[in-house]
Image (cartoon, helix red, strand yellow):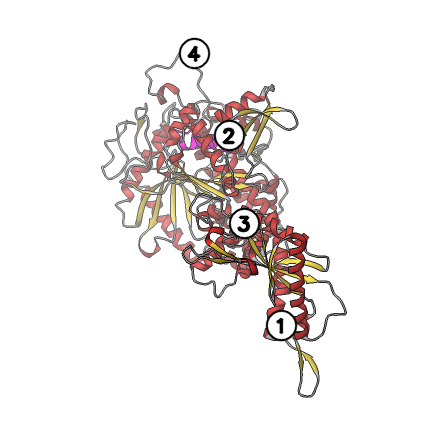
Amino acid sequence: LQIEELLKEVTLKETKKKKIDAFLHEINSLLSVIPETPETELTDQAWLPKGVKVPFLQVPFSVKGKFRFVPPVELKVVGSYLLGTCIKPEINVDVAVTMPQEIFQDKDNLNQRYHRKRALYLAHIAQHFSKEKLFGSVKFAYMNSNHLKPILLLRPQGKDEKMVTVRLHACPVPSLFKPSRFYPSKNNIRTAWFMEQSTPKEGATEPPTPHYNNSILCDTVLLSHLHFLSSAATDFPGMKDGLALLKVWLNQRQLSKGLGCFNGFLVSMLVAYLLMKRKIVKMMSGYQVLRSTLQFLATTDLSVMGISLAKDGDASLPVLDDFHQAFEVVFVDPSGLVNLCADMTASKYHQVQFEAKRSMEILDDRMVDGFQALLMTAKPTLRTFDHVFHLKHVSKLQGACKKMQLLNELMDRGGNYMAAALPFIVSLLARGLAGRALLVAHSLPQIQEWPIDAEPPKHKDVGPLTFGLLFVPEFAASTLEKGPQADHPEALDFRTFWGEKSELRRFQDGSICEAVVWEADTVCQKRLIPEQIVKHLLKLHADIPESSICYTGALLESVIRTGKEVSGTGEEAMVNVICSYDDLSRKLPLTVTAVQGVHPVIRYTDVFPPIPMKPIYSFHTRVRTKHLLLPSEEKPCPAYIAPLKIICHMEGSGQWPQDKEAIKRIKAAFHLQLAELLQQQHQLVCRPAVTHTDVYKDGYVFRLQVAYHREPLILKEVVTPEGMLKYQDTEESRQLEMETLHLPYLTSSLHGLPQQHPVFGSTCRLAKRWVSAQLLSDNISEECVDLLVAFLFLHPAPFTPP
């Protein structure tokens, strides 16, 4: 039922479809009457009015070839709108505008000639459409933020402007180019042209340009992809619902927009592939399609073993190995020529794979509401990853391309240094953080649409690039990076990778190995070792200065630090308290059957853990008769030491009285006896009282309170006027039950969580600071905050435990 409701919400209604169809018919009639232009050189763009700029970065500017505008041969709707799989809130209708063959010449496949003609074609259409009253807005955008592929965005006038965006794709006649020119191993960008050299170097071989080739081939197969998907969707209503659910799933994880995204078209082709391989059948419902696709993604690594929709038979077509040499992720279309995942990095696919695995675990877990976790909860980068850092100045990647010698990749990507450097940066970080990081991911570069009278956005206009790191808790804070033995051939590679940080070290087993040791004294500093690694590697291998990296791993830790000097965030102080508490527990006499701490420090969640306090004797006057230290009037006031409450359960016996007043007196006697024993046997300073005994040990004050398990029950006894004995809760019994039963049980239960999740304690402390800052600490108790945080760690779906 939930899925049905969601599908109703995201599916396009019939009334809207009629309006969109009418809008498309009007666009078609307007396109056919756009006038032709005389033939000019490609570089002579004076015929374009000043109000329209070419939506293409023409670097280098000089290029051979001629251009003239001739009205399109045909206009065809392609993509999800015709298939009925486009979903709200953004309704995009893709329209393929076929450019006539006569505007092209031989060798238009070379040196961006085709791309520039395509951009000029769209610019001329934009100029005429901008005068029409039919359109509310006429803008340019890059298709999936790929600057080689500008498209024209058309929106209707008035209140329907947000209803639909029609995206015009200029594409050639399918028979225009010979497919063999665009195999992944072929070159179509000449180095001499790209470097603006007058003559090519003698004997120099031209590098392959697979991404450039793929971008041209994509335009030639738009219609064949539509026919392929429509034949798959025939008599298969579950495919439409399944694709809608998969698109929602991708949108919630921010995977469906940007350069190298896993978009709706890609997931549609994947479902068609699974149908072809009989892993999905046409009888399946939308939910079953979703499960089958996620299962396939979780178990198949397309960066290692690619898949193809092409039927075997044509020996002249490139094989999967050819694609693997050219691209990081491989998914070949039915023509056998186009890699649908050409722009995707291996890191982004591994993120999709990780999310699919996590989603399958959630769907199989009956304790979790899978629908809510998978389809209704957004997963932004900041909440998905443990540490996030931003590369503020993307232009620094130009220097990185130079340092890493990525000229061939730059040519292939049309000068887009960000797209050329990104796969290398991510693999560099993945190698440096191997063993520490489960996942190293990056945000998808996105370039916003722009008005037709503005210059096209530059490569640096993608804004800051964000990287997310998901850690393995056991190894994330390790201070040692152990390398190969000094006499092994891999040692040189290790030294080259880590630079001056690498040094020879002798280990306890007698081996002499290359190793990197990171400086970190406190737990807080150890948590930030990945920051040291990231900054060191990016500076060493990519010339990216530390000032360009904004690392967010410990932004809030200042609010749980104590003292003015730079120290840790209290983890060490809590460990010291617990060591002292354990030592005291062992010193108590045998008649004490159980010792349970109640104070938050015992469960590692005290906001400011106690610091050991030793009295300064010169500030006090000693009263020898009573073993007291009295503060001197003229000296500073002594520090307050918060007592740490400990419940001591005595062994059961029939000799305990059944009267509540008598029990209190017995407990007072036990407190006196405990103080006497600890003083005599262990020379600890003790101060007994009626309700407790204070013990001063290692600079801390432990407040021992004796508990008798039947006492709460005796406090509940009430005699009725008829002389009947009955049990009912009283304020006193509730308080005692809370102190001697529930709180010790809570502390014992939560004591083990920090061993499983090292940052549990720090998270509780930050949460308590936030609750106090909102002036809510009187209404929400410390124990309540601890339990809420514990729930987040034990039931984090759809996220991973922090």
Task: Determine which residue is flagged by label 1.
Answer: 733
Q: Does 175 sit above or below residue 755? A: above
Give the mark nearer the N terminus: 2 vs 4: 4
Q: Earlier in the sequence, mark 1 or mark 2?
A: 2
Name the amino acid type tagged 4: Gly
Could you tell me which secondary element the residue under label 3 belongs to?
loop
Residue 593 in sight: yes
Q: Position of residue 79 (x, y in %)?
A: 46, 44
Cα separation, mark 3 vs mark 2, equals: 30 Å
Q: Amino acid at mark 2?
A: Phe
- Could you tell which of marks 3 and 1 lies nearer the N-terminus? 1
Q: Which residue lies under the disc numbered 2?
A: 327
Q: Give the left or right position of residue 596, taking residue 374 as reference.
A: right
Question: Image point 49% across, 36% down: which residue?
Answer: 344
Tell me the distance, in whole angstroms, between the alpha carbons under discs 4 and 3: 55 Å
Q: Residues within 10 Å of mark 1 (few under 14, many from 20)?
A: some
- Mark nearer the N terminus (3 vs 2): 2
Characterize the local packing of mark 3: few (<14), some (14-19) or many (20 or more) Cα atoms within 10 angstroms: many
Q: Which residue does the numbered mark 4 point to in the structure image?
A: 203
Q: Secondary structure at mark 2?
A: loop
The residue most toward the front is 625
Tell me the kind of residue under disc 1: Ser
Residues shaded magenta: 413-429
Which of the two labelled residues, at mark 4 and mark 3, occupies the earlier sequence position? 4
Q: Nearer the viewer, residue 119 or 148?
A: 148
